[in-house]
Amino acid sequence: MSNNEYDIIIIGSGPAGISAATLADHHKARVLVLDENCAPGGQLYRAIEKNQKNDNEWLGQSYQDGLPLVEAFRESHVNYQRSAKVWHLSNDKVVHYSVNGKAHAAKGRQILIATGAQERPFPIPGWTLNGVMSAGAAQILLKESGVVCENAVFVGTGPLLYLIAHQYISAGIAIKAIIDTTPRGNYLRAIKYVFGALGSIKNILQGWRWKREIIRSGTLYIYNISDVKINGVNSVVSVEYCQKGKWKNIDCKYVFLHQGITPEINTSLSAGCNKSWNERQACWTIDIDQYGQSSVKGISIAGDASSIAGGVAAAQRGSIAALNMLCNIDIISSNNREVFSKPFKRKLNAEMAARPFIDTLFRPHSRYRVPTSSNTIICRCEEVTLAQIQESIALGCKGPSQLKSFTRCGMGPCQGRLCGLSVSEILAKELRVSAKQIGYYKIRPPIKPVTLGELASLDEA
Amino acid sequence: MFRSINNNQSELITIYFEGKALRVQKDLNVATALLEAGISNFRETTIKNENRGPYCMMGVCFDCLINIDGMDNQQSCMVKVSDGMKINRQITRNTSQDEQ
Ligand code: FES
């Protein structure tokens, strides 16, 4: 095998990626792990090694649980390339990536996409103002650098929102207000799934405990709202919310938004993997079989990059995918694949049983997915508003790719990551069809912006 | 306001934002260092000339693009600070299409 050929190439070093890598290495496979960040752990266990020294106990137990995974990964012989930006994955399993502006190519007999999740777009008026960030960003600042933001307003729904608020309160950081957008009807809808979730009752109770402690801390906690927007010119001045038909104002300089997380699909789509619309999670998911194998031969997907199931599930899905890939390249027998994957499947099933409950409870209201106010920016990069999209539809635009030529929506550097989902749902609503019928942007390489200099450096190599 | 609550601060280095010297911890990324210094206005958008700053902090949104040592379109949430680094607000056109 030449230098840049591997049995398995894994994109992403979150719980799915490192679990898969460590297991494949254990079976003596030659493994390359590429990750954009500067240390393993993904978003969930970000900077976990660094935080051991800092003794920041307010980060919580579910975070600390990631340490054994990262340590086992560090002890393995896996070739781990950090700060690697993957910009092309071809369906013949060649991965192109750049490190410090220099391009490289590597070929894998099997590829595992473990690129995790991103936060769902939350297009409301004012979400592009200076001072507005995602709640995930607040988490990253806290874990990676111990940086916090005093007197911010948190707006949205989902476990991550309660987690970060709870961490702030535990660390003694004042929160101006939490505006909970969880639709009231969700509680009722979720109840019927609660029995299925009993296997993960620990997590659910923990969520309730967070919420209770947040409320007990005396933080202003606002719920049962019907709309929210952010005011300001260039930077945030206030958040306004509508409760029982009345608009109320909270003055603030910083706002953290969250409306749950969705799979990072661009990498899989660019490789030609099939996707489906998942109505319960209100997002696109990538089709995989029980082993994580996608519709493209030799390309598997593990963890939240296929569908959202959380970090514990991601580690199991990574391990199962690794066993299947090892079987595909005849390192283990199919019999052993079944035997070895049993404990991972058992743990995964318990996690998955809780999903209907969690997904239903935190399913964002359509108002926060498909905005109603026409001046709301949908494509942050090209500054395309809802009104412009509606105009294009009136002129005959029928799909996301066509919308690009009408408005440049989705053509900026983020390549549709912060507008793609909104665009699918806006078109669906306006054209009165399902999001599934509308589809998604056609994702073409490069999947991350590359300079001509970077491209040229590949030929030299 | 953004501030650090880490008890283990890393060594301080000097970076320059719009010509002004800032002392920042050396293990921060550029976006975090600027936020901690009270700067959230990283660039001006091309079409509406509005101020923008970091949104996701994880390399997804590209809203944190900034000029670093003379080069536009640097994803500041993904780049570590280094001593003497010169950072400037970005006010030029910046779409991926122009680069490809
Ligand atoms: S803040 Fe989103 S890419 Fe840097």
Image (cartoon, rainbow, N blue to C red):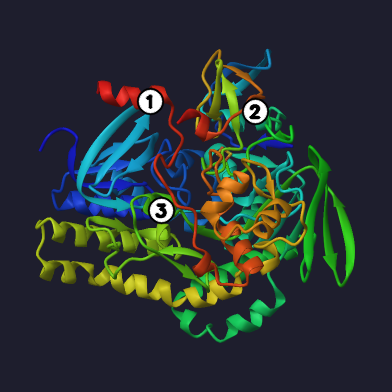
- According to the image, label 2 marks what residue? B34
In the picture provided, is A106 more to the left or to the right than A417?
left
| Amino acid marked by disc 1 | Glu
- According to the image, label 1 marks what residue? A454
Chain designation of label 1: A
- According to the image, label 3 marks what residue? A66
| Amino acid marked by disc 3 | Gly
- How far across and down, in percent of the image, does residue A293 sit? 27, 62
Mark 1–mark 2 distance (CA, rounded to whole Å): 27 Å
Quadrant in which ligand 1 is drawn:
top right
Chain designation of label 2: B
Residue A182 makes an appearance in the image? yes
Crowding at mark 2 (Cα within 10 Å: few <14, some 14-19, many 20+): many
Looking at the image, tell me whether mark 1 or mark 3 is earlier in sequence order.
3
In this picture, is A137 found above or below A217?
above
Q: Residue at x 43, y 48 (%)?
A: A42
**Front: mark 2 or 3:** 2
Quarter of the image with the C terminus of chain A in it: top left
Q: Cβ–Cβ below 8 Å for labels 1 and 3?
A: no
Q: Residue at x 48, y 70 (%)?
A: A278
Q: Residue at x 58, y 68 (%)?
A: A207
* Label 1 in the same subunit as label 2: no
Chain designation of label 3: A
Q: Residue at x 36, y 31 (%)?
A: A98
| Amino acid marked by disc 2 | Leu
Q: Secondary structure at mark 3?
A: loop
In this picture, is A341 found above or below A253?
below
Q: Secondary structure at mark 1?
A: helix
- How far across and down, in percent of the image, does residue A12 sit? 37, 47
